[in-house]
Amino acid sequence: MFEQIVDDLLNERSEISITLRTRPRSQATVLARDLQQITTTTVAAHATKKLSFPGKTADEAWRFSVVLRILQIMHEALRNDVVLSKRDVYYRDPALFGNQNIVDRYVDDIALTFGMTRSSLNVTAAAKGLIAGAAKFYKRDGSITTLALYESTLIFDPKDLFSVDMTHTRWILVIEKEATFRSLLNSPFWRSASSQGILLTGKGYPDLSTRRLLNFMGIPSMRNGFLAIPVYGLVDFDPDGLSILSTYQHGSLALAHENAEHTVPGMQWLGLRSIHLQDVIGHVHAEQELLALTARDRGMARRMLDREISREGSGAHHERQQTCPRTELQRMLMLNFKAELQVLDAIPEGVENLLAPLLRAFVA
């Protein structure tokens, strides 16, 4: 890219330009397509956008400058073998970039254009996820990190890891929300199961570092001793909860070119399901936690249901039945309510009862 720009300048062309592949940003587009069908071919077929300088407008000239500056920062990071977060990139030139979203967008588009992951360009997202449990991580610099059983550890970049020792790990439980994650750390369940399990949370929609670490642990490979450790998901009973679970399992359309390193297709949905809410009925305080679906919720659920029905017709439905079963979406729309994981806190031993099958199966 830099050489092409230099050639254009040396030949005194009227303008210089950069062409980027762009990712779909419409939520409707994301929900209308099957992420499992995304391949390198479909990524290559993404729309392209040409940014020129001086450009037809001042905005185009500014965007060209933004992309060129990000490319320069990436090039410098690669030459110096320095890993930067997207936030670091923004603070290299905040006056030019204006806001963090601009940097986030073009970093991802540049990675897509080059057909590689952001980590390959030495740019990562700042980790926000938390982890605790029975595992020991060996880093490339020779250091060792042993997870605490009753305290959370901030997710670290798997790029820095050499291997993980999960000899005593029998299962991994991924939890949607930090509040439930911390509640479990102090629960009787965890006191019984901590020596044989791992708890992980992405604090809502997970960042790439959290998803990549889960892939590192949950997909059998030489890095984890080829262990096929069961991975379970615990999310809210609402469309966003199911979408978050799907993100862990199959990734996102916007970052389809990176999904292979950030997904765990075999992840199983432990809850929250409609059957778990039967115990809520009759508990006055718990019933107050049941919320009516909003117009956005119903629209999202219908689109997800339409996708499930179309997938069923193509024969791919049962492969993702654990993620977003058709019957659960139908019940959600029929009952017209949603529930967060915290609803179980209003019921005596609610969370422990939900996790009882896991405890019986793997802690003997």
Image: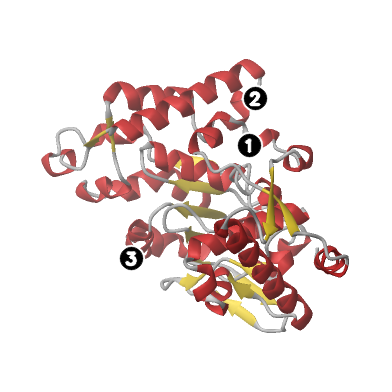
Of the residues shown, which amino acid type is indicated by label 3? Asn
Q: Is residue 39 above or below residue 68?
A: above
Foreground pick, 225 / 309? 309
SS at mark 3?
A: loop
The numbered dot on residue 35 is 1
Q: Is residue 146 left or right of residue 159?
A: left
Q: Earlier in the sequence, mark 1 or mark 2?
A: 1
Of the residues shown, which amino acid type is indicated by label 2? Ala
Q: Nearer the viewer, mark 3 or mark 1?
A: 1
Q: Position of residue 324 (x, y in %)?
A: 49, 32
Residue plotted at (36% across, 59% down)? 184
Q: Position of residue 335 (x, y in %)?
A: 27, 24
Q: Mark 3–mark 2 contact, CB under 8 Å?
A: no
Q: Residues within 10 Å of mark 3 (few under 14, many from 20)?
A: few
Residue plotted at (62% across, 75% down)? 84
Q: Nearer the viewer, mark 3 or mark 2?
A: 2
Q: Earlier in the sequence, mark 3 or mark 1?
A: 1
Tell me if residue 364 can be seen.
no
Residue plotted at (66% across, 19% down)? 315
The numbered dot on residue 316 is 2
Q: Earlier in the sequence, mark 3 or mark 2?
A: 3
Foreground pick, 342 / 67? 67
Q: Nearer the viewer, mark 1 or mark 2?
A: 1
Q: Is residue 83 above or below residue 342?
A: below
Task: State the residue lying farthest toward the left.
Answer: 284
Q: Position of residue 29 (x, y in %)?
A: 55, 34
Location of mark 3 (residue): 186
Q: Mark 3–mark 1 contact, CB under 8 Å?
A: no
Q: Mark 1–mark 2 contact, CB under 8 Å?
A: no
Q: Quadrant of residue 120?
A: bottom right
Distance from the alpha carbon under mark 1 to that under mark 2: 12 Å
